[in-house]
Image (cartoon, rainbow, N blue to C red):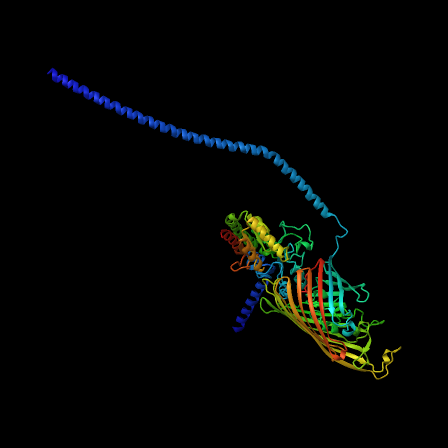
Amino acid sequence: MKLKTFIGLSSALCLCVTIAQAQETNEVEQLKQQLRQMQENFEKTANEQRQQIEALTKKLDELTSQRQTTATSAPSTAVTTNQFNELNEKVNQVAEAQKKTRPSEFNPAIGLVGETIFSYRSKGSDAIGSDRPGGFDVFQRSLELNVAASVDPFAKGYAVVNASADSATGEATMDVEEAALQTTSLPGNLELKAGRFFGEFGRLAYIHDHELPFVNRPLALDKYIGGESQSDGVQLNWLPPIPHYVSATVGVGDHFGGDSPNPDHPGNFRAFDGLNFWGRLSTYFDLTPNWQLEAGVSGLWNPKEQNRGGFDAFAGSKGNPVTERERRLAGVDFKLSYVPLQNNQFRSFTWGTELLYSDNRYLVDPDGSLAGTPPVYSGDEFNRSVGSLGGYTYVSYKWSRQWSAGFLFDYAQSPENRSDQTFEYSPFVTFALSHWNQLRLQYTHTSHDASSGLKPDDAIYMQWAWIIGAHSHGWQQR
Amino acid sequence: MKLKLYFITLITLLCAAQVHAAKIRVVATLTDLADLTRNIGGDHVEVRSLATGIEDTHGVPMKPSFVPVLNRADLVVLVGFDCEHAFLPALLEASKNPRIQNGKPGYVDCSVGIVPMEVPKSTDHSEGDVHPYGNPHYMLDPALAKTAVQNIFTALVATAPEYEADFTRNRDAYLARLDAKIAEWQQLAAPLKGVKFVSYHEHWCYFAKRFGLDYVGTIELKPGVDPTPRHITDLISEMKAEHIPIVVREPQFPEKVPALIAQQTGATLVKLPIMPGGVPNTGTYIEEMDYIVHSLVDALKK
């Protein structure tokens, strides 16, 4: 029994010890696990706190730098204020300067145009009837001073003064080409121009030399109009109040033609029929957005012509003294243009044509008695009308902003003797360095009818035209 | 009965004609201003633009057919800053319409209130065809277009005060649309900030300032003066050195030289309109600006 009890107790003790040992092992594991967990928790907390510390540090840095910025910006604000005051002072000074009245305050727009022609002509001036020498020639054709400004709310004034070199002496002679007043606010779509100006006749007669599309003015304009259509007079233009463009112009003046600025009838009394009357009717069509057509008719009449251009009698076709008694001129013109909307500064085409018909009446004085002092009508005098024709046609093509080229054909019968005919053809090429600086090279062949006694000739021209100062694109130069 | 019908028809036609006649006749020089005027004026205006959109802003042809249109106009709306110097003064003189002459109420200069950029120190022609009052291409900055809107609105109200409420409503609606688009364009144009570019003519200074681009120079030697071979060579060298990625060509200028420069430098050539209608699908001002911003952003991606 004791043994059983002993074995039992021993077994129980062993079991207890085993259990106790097992319990002890579990506790260690638990403790270890607890420790690991605590360590993990510690590390996690430490990380979090580290992150918080870092965030706080960063924030602190930012705040510190902001404070520093604020601290340093205080002087910069002061600088800005100083700069503002300085700027304000400058603005006030400029404003004050603007208020000052200068002696030139009311000066008009001023522009100067220069034009030099370098040329070579194969024949002498006597053989070709030119006022310039044959061979090599340099001609300062014009130095043109343009001034323009508003006169008041109702009108503007402009003047063109031109100086050109004399072929014999080289001295420049000044000439008032235009000096006119033009209304700006007449009712009824009317515009009045008065003074000396280029009257509206045809297409190119009222264009200044340097604005022509070629070097020289066409023969027909020289022979029938007398160069530019200059007149001392008054001109009225009317724009009819209709949707289609039509322009109507009438004018009256004491002469017509720039080559002969002397007034007709220079004596002590000029009757109404001694004046020149002219008119023009023109219209325009948009053929397509890029193609345009302008057309016009013009007329000029001087019922009682006398001493035009300072010349009274001249030798007629048969050598008889002839005096111009009535001047009648009619013209028809058109211009077909390709002006592409998109790139018209780089590409364009123009075909312009103008035909003139002159039907002047002359007094023929076979015995020359009218040329005596005093003039005497001997009874052999008779009137004769001479119908003559002239015109020009040209094409011009522009293929870049700088380059263009064209061809001009020119024909004119003499208004005094229609069998005296002249024709010319002229290819030309233009190089525009800029809008204000242009070179043009032109070759011209001229042929005369044998009755003129003049010789055919060939010429090469180099035109150099330049502009300084104010330069506007006028309606007539479009 | 027939007579009665005849009179009713006649009176209706006369009334219709009266309504038509009552419209304010506006001539805008360029298509962007015409678009703004239509948006503000609505049914009360009859707007005609001298340009169709493909022209150079300084080179609208002086067509005589414009003269009767200007002769009957109540208002002429222009960019100002001498932008239209090559054609408008002569056309206005030929129009014989005292209502729209410079200084008269019908002369609506949209540059009023705009601070110009690139005001030249000298108007000497050695600097080319400079604009003495500053660069006139402010309409390429949509924020400045709002000033033009206001100027047109003021002129319309002065001409027809009875429609002020309509004009105000239209203006506000258009400005709201424009503001929304400006925000959209600025967001879209964010990648363009600091991007360098050159163009044929100096159209883009206002645009560049608004959207943060770096406008380096022009292909033209000077305004209105074609580039010389030396200028082209120098420009190519500069573009290579500065890695300039965009060459802008405006539609009215020839493609040859810009294409050559783009090819030599590896830059992308972009054709951009300077007013509505300059390229297809840009009929309105907003469409035009949309096209410009999208085209530049697309060019940068290439």
Percent position of residue B36, x then y: 57, 56
Percent position of residue B129, x then y: 66, 56
Q: A155 or B281, which lies in front?
A: B281
Direction bottom: furthest residue = A380
Percent position of residue A461, x then y: 71, 67
Label count reads: 0
Hey, which quadrant is residue A471 in on the image? bottom right
Q: B263 above or below A244?
A: above
Q: Residue at x 73, y 67 (%)?
A: A119
Q: Residue at x 38, y 29 (%)?
A: A43
Direction from residue B293 to residue A244 in the image, left or right: right
Direction right: furthest residue = A373
Direction from residue B76 to residue A456 in the image, left or right: right
Direction from residue B264 to residue A259 in the image, left or right: right
Q: A81 above or below B178?
A: above
Hey, which quadrant is residue A218 in on the image? bottom right
Q: A184 above or below A225?
A: above
